[in-house]
Image (cartoon, rainbow, N blue to C red):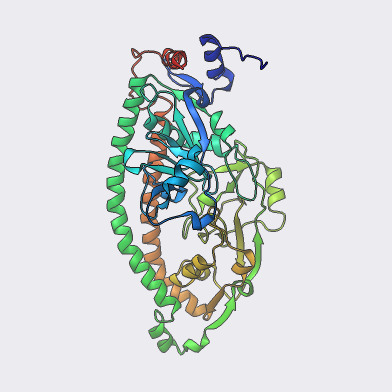
Amino acid sequence: MAKKTKELTLEEKLEQALIPVDEQPYEVPENWCWAVLDSLSEVISKGTTPKGGKDAYVDDGVNFLRVENFLDDGTISTDEMKHITENVHFNELKRSILLENDVLVSIAGSLGKTAIVDKTSLPLNTNQAVAFIRLLDTAKVNPKYLRLYLASPMTQELLLGKTKVTSIPNLTLKIISDTPIALPPLAEQQRIVDRIESLFAKLDEAKDKVESVLNNTDNRKSAMLFQAMSRELTKKWREQNGYSKNNWEKYTIEEICENIVDCPHSTPSWTEEGVLCLRTTNIKQGYLDLSETQFVSNETYVERTERLIPKAGDLIFTREGSVGDVAIVPENVQLCMGQRMMLMRTNEKCRPQYLLYYLTSPFIRNHIKASIMGTTAPRMNIKDIKKLSIMIPTLSEQDEIINNLIGTIENYDEIEKIIDNIDQMKKSILSKAFRGLLDTNNCNDERAIDLLRLILGEN
């Protein structure tokens, strides 16, 4: 006879659900509490990939969600949505049928993206790169609050810091289940959601206007880069200075660099202070964004720079994730390279700025896009990067091209930085929201621990 499992009392459930004080990630208002996500959830599971691969998809049927369908605002896009038959949905994939208000997290490839299921997406199923959280009681824990909380920088750092490292990084269901949740009273949950949505709407409006300017500048930038690399931009200059377009010679990236070094593949151990260590998120198209940084110890710095220490004028190129982003190392900054990137140091044949412009030109961007391998974890082979072809004019003509481009490129980069600042403001709002620092908290609200006790007592 099977042994009967002991029924936990409400106080025992509460003790299991609450995060001990010494394990709480940060301080929250007194009427909030810290709870384990698993204690608030009916189900925490993940999707299933249908048998047959691409052949399992049909032209019309049940929506089949992939990470590509997650939008930045937490909604789901039906553009490029795949479909499966009802038979597959209700039988083979019945374990991963999604319901309204399920909170979603991407757990493979592009990690930590979040979304929430609404009625318009149903019926809906999903693949194994997506985890779903079904709350015990959506009348007591706001799904929008949970989605925003999981998208906040602090929670993202917590989740990604526990990522299981394999050939394709992934989050486990155990990591998600054990996530500590800063739980406010129900009324405060709604106030936080309302305040974030209101502030984000204003920031999105500002971002749309800036992006409109950026698009116009981008078109001009692309046109000038195209003219430069097709030898048209400096045609008159060559005529005036006695040069010919025949002075341009074809090389590979490897031939115009004195050194190309792939970064270490391991994730470094972060420290509170020390040497700044680049991550792929720091590398934008044409410049380094050091607004969010991590540090490593001097010992780690020495280990990771054994083959080559980054110096001013070196190019950092991302070869995984957002493949092909490239930036130049600035003056007077000591840097250590993280992972999924490589360092290029040009030789006497090529100016670093010229190589930067070439790698950001439509010519090479389209070639890189066609060379990318993988979908959940896009990457480019190091050998392919080294063998990329590049047309090189004389150093004098390179200087002329740089002088022609620099004004437009700098304007474009400045506009991009404004957009990045807007994104940073969003992150700051999220960070403040889940510490109770948006001036929305009401100390007269019911205590969150009483709300938690009610949830656990009913389930």
Residue 118 visible in this rendered orientation of the protein: yes
With respect to residue 318, does 153 lie above or below?
Answer: above
Residue at point 36%, 20% (across, down): 186
Is 152 or 243 nearer to us in this picture?
152
The answer to which image quadrant residue 229 occupies is bottom left
Q: Position of residue 117 (x, y in %)?
A: 38, 38
Q: Where is residue 5 in the image (x, y as percent from the top left)?
A: 61, 15
Is 378 or 425 nearer to us in this picture?
378
Quadrant of the image containing the N terminus: top right
Residue at point 50%, 34% (across, down): 155
Report the side of 177 relative to 216 (left or right). Answer: right
- How many numbered discs? 0
Q: Position of residue 158 (x, y in %)?
A: 55, 34
The answer to which image quadrant residue 190 occupies is top left
With respect to residue 219, does 335 lie above or below?
Answer: above
Report the side of 66 relative to 273 (left or right). Answer: left
Report the side of 222 relative to 261 (left or right). Answer: left
Is 292 or 112 nearer to us in this picture?
112
Residue 112 visible in this rendered orientation of the protein: no
Q: Where is residue 303 in the image (x, y as percent from the top left)?
A: 72, 49
